[in-house]
Image (cartoon, grey):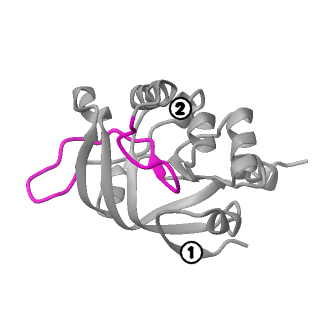
Amino acid sequence: MSSTKKITTPLTSEMVKDLRIGDKVLLTGIIYSARDAAHKRIVDMMAKGEKLPFELQGATIYFMGPAPAKPGYAIGSAGPTTSYRMDAYSPTLIAAGLKGMIGKGARSKEVVEAMKQHAAVYFAATGGAGALIAKSIKKAEIVAFEDLGAEAVRRLEVVDFPCTVAQDCYGENLYEEGVKEYRKE
C-alpha cells in the first residue's frame, strides 16, 4: 500500500532508501529541468573536468522542456518528457551524485543498475498534466545552455510538486508491477 510523503530536496541516500514504488511524493525545494541535449552537454563537461552548472550531489532532474510562461506565472505548461532519451547519460550522472529523476516511461537496465548501486530514485510525473504541475513551480530561472531554448537547464523552486515513485533503488518497477496486478491469468 502506498503512502504520501513530503520530501524536501536535496535528496540523500537515506531519503531514497525510504521510498518504495507506488509511494506518492510531494517534493519541495530545488530541482533542475534538463532534457537530452542538456544531459549530453553536462556529461561532456564532466569528461573534460569542467565546472557543472549545478551541484549534482543530491540533485533531482526533471525531464521537461516548458512552454513559455504567461504573465504572472513562473513557467508555462511543464509536463514530463519520455525518459528513455536520457538513459545514455543517467548512469554517469547518478554515479556523480544525482539522486532523483522525474519523467515518464520506464528506464533501461543500465539506469536501474546505477540506481541500485548509488541509491537513486526515479519518479513519474503525470503526462498530460503539465498545466497542473506548473502550479507547483514557484520560480524558474535558466542556469545553463540558454541556446537550447525550452531545453535549457532551469533551476526550479517547487512546493508540493506531485510525483510517484516509479522505480526505486531496490530495482522494483511500478510499470511492471502495475501490469502484473491487472493481468488476467
Residue 86: percent from the left, percent from the top?
53, 32
* Helix, strand or loop at mark 2: helix
**Residue displayed at 45% across by 29% down:** 36
- Give the Cα separation between the discs numbered 1 and 2: 26 Å
Q: Quadrant of the N terminus?
A: bottom right
Q: Is residue 126 visible?
A: no
**Residue displayed at 30% across by 35% down:** 152
N-terminal-most mark, 1 or 2: 1
Instruction: Looking at the picture, tell me which residue is in the foreground, 24 or 148.
Output: 148
Which amino acid type corresponds to the residue marked 1 in the rendered image?
Answer: Lys
Residue 141: percent from the left, percent from the top?
22, 49
Tell me where residue 17 sits by quadrant.
bottom right
Instruction: Looking at the picture, tell me which residue is in the foreground, 71 or 185.
Output: 71
Query: What residue occupies the far right of the structure in this picture?
Result: 185
Query: What residue occupies the far front of the structure in this picture?
Result: 49
Which amino acid type corresponds to the residue marked 2 in the rendered image?
Answer: Met
Majority secondary structure in the magenta region: loop
CB contact under 8 Å: marks 1 and 2: no
Tell me where residue 94 sits by quadrant.
top right
**Residue displayed at 48% across by 48% down:** 56
Residue, disc 1: 5
| 47 part of magenta stretch | no
- Determine whether, in the image, residue 184 is placed left or right of residue 125: right
Q: Is residue 180 visible?
A: yes
Residue, disc 2: 86
**Residue displayed at 64% across by 67% down:** 23
| Residue range corresponding to the magenta coloring | 51-76
- Determine whether, in the image, residue 66 is placed left or right of residue 13: left
* Helix, strand or loop at mark 1: strand
